[in-house]
Image (tube, rainbow, N blue to C red):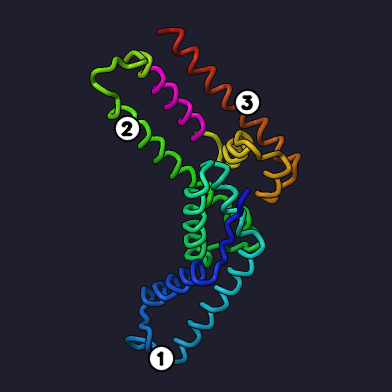
Amino acid sequence: MQELVLVQPGRTAGRLAAANDNDRFAAGYSNDRPTGARDKEEELAHEAAQADTRREFEERLAECGPLAYRVARGVLRNTADAEDVAQETLLRAYRRFDRLRDRTRFRAWLVRIAFRLALDRLRSGKRRELRDTVWSQPEHQPPTRTAEDLAASKELQAHLDNALAELPEKLRLVLLLAAMEGHTIEEIAGMLGISTGTVKSRIFYARKQLAEKLRCYANTIKKR
């Protein structure tokens, strides 16, 4: 599996620099000198703090940055989309890095960002696929499925999506990663920085809760 190197000269580093410049501008600084009542000493202190933050971020990213790509690839199963999500994850994590109080949780924090962005991309793609399928149906050809079948399928998919969304995030994450081809218990444990026993436990409870939700849905259908 091809891994995306998130720290790339001229690409990611350039984006980080641009993000850093934008953050400085938003904080009331120009590229040449501070504005308002801020003096040169405050500007230098701010720049030093920014440099320290960026240095720490890049050090932690070098250790586990490729996880963002692997998580996105596991959800999306598409290299191009996974690379886009990984880059977006990097930029978002950099902008929010100062909000992360426990820096030892960086790995799990980065994975959660990648996971959420990948899910958003996946849902958006499914909506486009459904819309394209509906509008591309030739008028002179009869649909392969009846309106009732389509409605039932759409309802089932919506219920499944809702059931997954209602799972606690830590359970939903391991379940989706486990369901994707190529991700073993050991790989998921490595991605999330948890033990294999914890992964197995979360998968068990995720499947149990999901089965209960789907069972309730099936009972509702029978009563119609």
| Secondary element type, mark 2 | helix
**Which region shows up in magenta?**
152-165
| Secondary element type, mark 3 | helix
Tag 3 residue = 208
Q: Residue at x 64, y 65 (%)?
A: 62
Q: Which of the pair 214/12 is nearer the observer?
A: 12
Residue 197 quadrant: top right
Where is residue 101? Give x, y as percent. 58, 63
Label 1 crowding class (10 Å Cα cut-off): few <14, some 14-19, many 20+?
few
Where is residue 35? Give x, y as percent. 33, 86
Label located before the other in sequence (2 or 3): 2
Where is residue 184? Give x, y as percent. 70, 39
Q: Which mark is residue 131?
A: 2
Q: Residue at x 40, y 91 (%)?
A: 39
Q: CA distance from mark 1 to mark 3?
A: 60 Å
Q: Nearer the viewer, mark 2 or mark 3?
A: 2
Label located before the other in sequence (1 or 3): 1
Label located before the other in sequence (2 or 1): 1
Q: Residue at x 53, y 23 (%)?
A: 213
